[in-house]
Image (cartoon, rainbow, N blue to C red):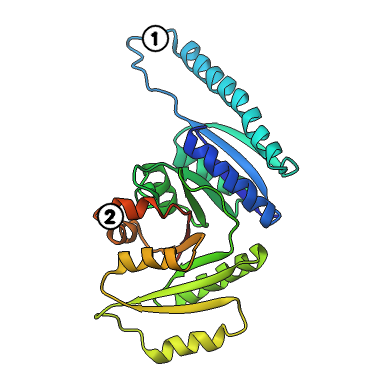
Amino acid sequence: MKRILFPTDFSEAATNAFVHALEFAKSINGELVLLHAFELPVYDNHYFPENYMIIYESIELAEFEHFKNELPKLRAIAQKRNLDDIRMTHRLMDGGLMFAVEKAIKEDQIDYVIMGTEGATGWIDALFGTNTTAVISEVDIPVFSVPVNAKFKSIKNIGFTTRFRPKDKKALIKVLKLAKKLEAKVKCLYVKTDSSDVSKETIKEWEHEFANDAVEFNVVFSDEVKESILDFILYKEIHVLTMLTYKRSFFENLFHHSLTKDCAASLDIPILAIPIK
């Protein structure tokens, strides 16, 4: 059974992502590990020489009570969607989010991370949320980034951006396995610019190799990579966009904030970031 880590701060974005996490767990026969991390403040012991433990214990107790009070709300969401049979466990951890996520991934043998992000202009800005970007950049497992405005839709079309490299092929094989469980189709996109060096023969080799899989390959000739991806999402009715993470700057360069805000706002879909070594 696959294990899905769901970090939450009980915000609107996190609550929205919880619905996606529930539905994804159902689709892949998985279970959820709910994680709430909090950081203890640093006090100068010159001013609080005798009250250290009292202060920290009171903060930990307050976080525990908050955590305990919020969990029934999440269970109510699961019950409303008839998904209350999905196994859920809980972790309340002190420390930074990144520390908590990495520790939970290791100790709970996590396969996926699903987390909500907030952004004023849709999923492009949402991708740059400090916490989400850090998690995507650091962890070695796939991360679903769910914008606050991304309402859940059944995943039938998975977008996959590629440059037809061997490492891309390994990632595509993983995505195809996931697509099979979701009963979805993978739609690949290669934006061929004037400086692109991928040959027609390479593309044909990929098409031949994956001829029996639920995948299609789309080649768009354009120097406007960002806009081409947005058009692809819209016209191919993509429900989740898969992107390969080589380094953090890849996202920052690809999705610069100069994109039209109205366009971005109309394309609120989750991002599935897959780390490539």
Q: Is residue 98 above or below residue 269?
A: above
For the N terminus, the quadrant is bottom right
Crowd tier of the residue under label 2, counting other residues whose Cα lies within 10 Å: few below 14, some 14–19, many 20 or above: few
Residue 164 seen in the figure: no
Decide if residue 261 is on the left or right side of residue 246. Answer: left
In the image, farthest residue toward the top? 50
Q: Amino acid at mark 1?
A: Pro
Q: Are marks 2 and 1 in contact (CB under 8 Å)?
A: no
CA separation in Å, label 2 and label 1: 54 Å
Crowd tier of the residue under label 1, counting other residues whose Cα lies within 10 Å: few below 14, some 14–19, many 20 or above: few
Name the residue located 54 percent from the left edge and 34 percent from the top edge. 36
Q: Nearer the viewer, residue 157 or 66?
A: 157
N-term-proximal mark, 2 vs 1:
1
Residue 81 seen in the figure: yes
Residue 139: x, y in percent?
A: 47, 53
Of circles 2 and 1, the one toward us is 2
Q: Amino acid at mark 2?
A: Thr
For the C terminus, the quadrant is bottom left
Determine which of the numbered discs, if any, sits on residue 49 in the image: 1
* Kind of element beneath mark 1: loop
Q: Is residue 1 above or below residue 52?
A: below
Name the residue located 62 percent from the left edge and 53 percent from the top edge. 24
Residue on which disc 2 sits? 260
Q: Is residue 215 above or below residue 264?
A: below
